[in-house]
Image (cartoon, helix red, strand yellow):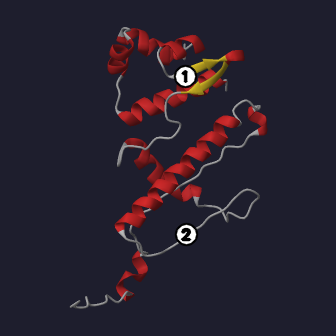
Amino acid sequence: MSQAAEVVDLLKAALKARGITYAELARRVGQSEASVKRWFAQRNFTLARLDRIGFIELMPNNRIRLRVARTFSWTPNGPIMEALKDNVADFFASDFAGTGEAMFLLNGRFTPGARHALAERLKKLAREFAELHWGEGALPQSERQPVSLLLACRPWQVAAIRPFIRTTPQRNVR
């Protein structure tokens, strides 16, 4: 897939994640909605056009720098997230013992502030993942394997052990 085609796919995902319609995008870039729809349907974006509408910065030798986030969050309980939930067992159907594979499930007790800090670090890791992906985008597809990185963090305990967890009574602090 060409770098421009990858950018188009990224743009579609970013627009969807932000709830920006083709009509809204057309208004923002001063084009008709039909033109914007045609660009996406035909994947008819020249690098110069992407640069002109502000999605990329066109650099010498047709290199590009993205001006939109390389990572995004799916709409909670939206169609993409629901599809992922329906197929997540397929992702975990592995022993994660191969070269370049890893799986960690870590448990701890954190304050809301520490949970927030951890979520911010996960976002940073997601950005680093995206940078690695884009850095290798110039290599032939035959040299690259699809890789998925699932990052999630929330207050949770395994349902099977919940009945056995003792609650500690609150101590009176004087």
Label 2, residues with CA under 10 Å away: few <14, some 14-19, many ≥20: few
Residue at which label 1 appears? 56
Q: Nearer the viewer, residue 58 or 95?
A: 58
Circle 2 SS class: loop
Circle 1 SS class: strand
Amino acid at pointer 2: Leu
**For the point 37% across and 81% down, which residue is it?**
162
- Residue 124 is left or right of residue 73, and the answer is right
Q: Which mark is residue 30?
A: none
Amino acid at pointer 1: Ile
**For the point 69% across and 58% down, which residue is it?**
101
The quadrant of the picture occupied by the C terminus is bottom left
Mark-to-mark CA distance, 2 and 1:
37 Å
- Residue 102 is left or right of residue 166, and the answer is right
Image x and y of residue 133, in percent: 65, 40
Image x and y of residue 69, in percent: 49, 35
**For the point 58% across and 52% down, which residue is it?**
149
Image x and y of residue 168, in percent: 31, 89
Which residue lies most toward the front here?
174
**For the point 74% across and 40% down, which residue is it?**
144
Q: Nearer the viewer, residue 171 or 28?
A: 171
Label 1, residues with CA under 10 Å away: few <14, some 14-19, many ≥20: some
Residue at which label 2 appears? 105
- Residue 124 is left or right of residue 78, and the answer is right
The nearer-to-camera label among 2 and 1 is 1
